[in-house]
């Protein structure tokens, strides 16, 4: 059997962290088995579905690197087909018209509630002749579900889950206006798309029982199910925005690398021994849904950022320059020159260890791209205008006399200045750093000066003193 999985979000908002993990698990399972990963947009809620949300889902998946194998299916476009298939169940005796008015249904629920009974449809039109229908009432179409026995979901994560059929009422397939319900649309689409494995959150576990009954009514093969536990916050409560339940675009804007995000989501509920750093290629090789745990996983922003720092350090320097160039240009307000880009590339080994995300990396890299005259933050200004000014002037004289402009030569020259002034190296290096970078925090000073070059460094120093 060729594996076919799907990710089927509703376009009512951003691609949130739980949806991103569900998409990743489906994508990995399909890739691991050499199958196909499909995308379906469940846009039947016309009031809440928006094109902006559809675009956000596409963008989020693309940023994560989760490619789908066919054109996305738009569920609403298939509504006439869903309705047509449902009406065939009436012909086979697996569905029927129900003419209950809204008032009848309300009274039914109130009576059941008063009697301490579960509130569900009681099947009063299940075997009645439509000729008895009251005038003016548009019927719904209900599934004639089995009332005896059990429906067993053999779940790859939850194990065997048993539902008494008596608990599963005759759900509505077509509303009174003829539009299909969610349950019907999902089953028909999964069947038509050839879905073999339905991997989704465990909040859909009860839906799996109802959908299984519907599959059997159609005489279709039931897909295999895997219901993965939801993600909780660090405090064990349901994940919310205060925990970091943001859209994929928010994590991208935070400077998270897609590879780091994939690795982090992978480890939320799935494991392979003690491995923490797992490349995407390795994940495809190792992943299987049976290794997903039953307990909810906990989202931890600190762990995500630490993992991101690891991936940032492991990323090719030239690739990082391409990633941060737009961020730098936004901060600078001008395009990044070829000279500045080349200097950022040379300085990347010194920049990477100081950053946990692309934003921090871009901020650090600005030292190689700032236009003169530099603007100084308050701490840097205090260094170049305060007690360090005389030391800075002495350093300028020593540096201007150098014939070689390498890291070691620069450090030795400044160290000699400090000794001559009866000071430690840091006493001279701090005002020098401020003059060269406009800040008291930067990559290693002498590395920055070597990369900037003699002329740029001395000009910055001269401007700071003047």
Image: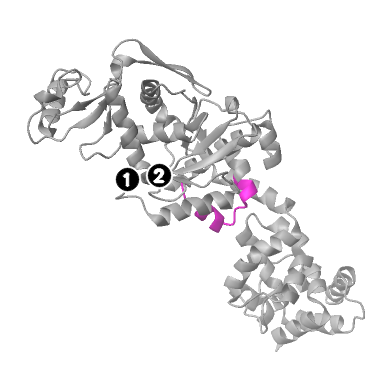
| Front one among 445 and 328 | 328
| Front one among 151 and 332 | 151
Describe the element under mark 1 as helix, strand or loop.
loop
Direction from residue 245 to residue 148 in the image, left or right: left
Q: Is residue 306 visible?
A: no
Residue at the spot of label 2: 10
Q: Picture coordinates of residue 211 (x, y %)? A: 38, 26
Direction from residue 288 to residue 87 in the image, left or right: left
Image position of 153 with respect to 61: above or below: above
Residue displayed at 30% across by 37% down: 180
Q: Is residue 187 magenta?
A: no
Q: Residue furthest front?
A: 91
Residue 25: which numbered mark, if any?
Answer: none
Q: Residue furthest left?
A: 135
Query: Which quadrant does the C terminus fall into?
Result: bottom right
Q: Is residue 11 visible?
A: yes
Q: Residue furthest right?
A: 403
Q: Picture coordinates of residue 333 (x, y %)? A: 58, 77
Residue displayed at 60% across by 33% down: 29
Image position of 406 with respect to 172: above or below: below
Q: Which residues are magenta?
A: 245-261
The quadrant in which residue 124 appears is: top left
Query: Which quadrant does the N terminus fall into?
Result: top right
Q: Is residue 250 magenta?
A: yes
Q: Do callouts 2 and 1 mark residues in contact (Cβ within 8 Å)?
A: yes
Image position of 185 with respect to 152: above or below: below
The quadrant in which residue 215 appears is: top left
Mark 2–mark 1 distance (CA, rounded to whole Å): 8 Å
Residue 45: which numbered mark, if any?
Answer: 1
């Amino acid at each position: 059997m060729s594996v076919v999985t799907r990710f089927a979000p509703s376009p009512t908002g951003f691609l949130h962290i739980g949806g991103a993990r569900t998409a990743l698990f489906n994508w990995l399972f399909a890739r691991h088995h050499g199958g196909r990963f499909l995308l379906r947009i469940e846009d039947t809620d016309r009031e809440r579905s928006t094109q902006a949300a559809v675009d956000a889902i596409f963008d989020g998946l693309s940023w994560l690197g989760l490619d789908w194998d066919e054109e996305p299916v738009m569920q609403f476009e298939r509504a006439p087909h869903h309705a047509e298939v449902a009406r065939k169940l009436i012909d086979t005796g697996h569905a029927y018209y129900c003419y209950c008015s809204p008032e009848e249904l309300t009274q039914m629920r109130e009576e059941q509630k008063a009697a301490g009974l579960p509130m569900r449809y009681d099947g009063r039109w299940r075997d009645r002749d439509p000729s008895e229908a009251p005038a003016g009432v548009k019927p719904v179409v209900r599934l004639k579900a089995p009332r005896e026995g059990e429906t067993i979901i053999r779940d790859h994560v939850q194990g065997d889950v048993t539902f008494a059929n008596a608990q599963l009422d005759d759900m509505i397939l077509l509303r009174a206006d003829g539009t299909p319900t969610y349950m019907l649309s999902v089953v028909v689409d999964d069947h038509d798309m050839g879905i073999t494995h339905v991997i989704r959150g465990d909040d859909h576990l009860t839906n799996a029982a109802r959908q299984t009954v519907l599959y059997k009514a159609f005489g279709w093969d039931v897909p295999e199910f895997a219901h993965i536990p939801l993600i909780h916050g660090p405090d064990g409560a349901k994940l919310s925005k205060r925990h970091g339940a943001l859209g994929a675009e928010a994590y991208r804007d935070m400077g998270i690398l897609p590879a780091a995000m994939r690795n982090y989501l992978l480890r939320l509920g799935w494991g392979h021994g003690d491995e923490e750093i797992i490349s995407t290629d390795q994940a495809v090789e190792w992943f299987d849904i049976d290794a997903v745990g039953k307990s909810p996983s906990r989202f931890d922003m600190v762990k995500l950022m630490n993992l991101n720092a690891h991936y940032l350090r492991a990323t090719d320097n030239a690739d990082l320059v391409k990633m941060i160039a737009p961020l730098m240009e936004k901060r600078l307000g001008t395009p990044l020159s070829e000279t500045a880009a080349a200097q950022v590339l040379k300085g990347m080994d010194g920049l990477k260890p100081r950053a946990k995300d692309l934003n921090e990396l871009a901020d650090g890299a600005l030292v190689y791209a700032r236009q003169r005259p530099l603007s100084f933050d308050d701490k840097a200004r205090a260094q170049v205008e305060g007690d360090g000014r005389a030391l800075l002037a002495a350093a300028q004289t020593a540096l201007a006399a150098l014939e070689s402009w390498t890291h070691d030569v620069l450090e030795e020259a400044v160290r000699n200045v400090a000794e001559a002034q009866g000071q430690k190296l840091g006493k001279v290096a701090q005002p020098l750093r401020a003059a060269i970078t406009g800040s008291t925090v930067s990559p290693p000073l002498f590395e920055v000066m070597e990369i900037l070059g003699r002329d740029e460094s001395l000009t910055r120093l001269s401007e700071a003193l003047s």
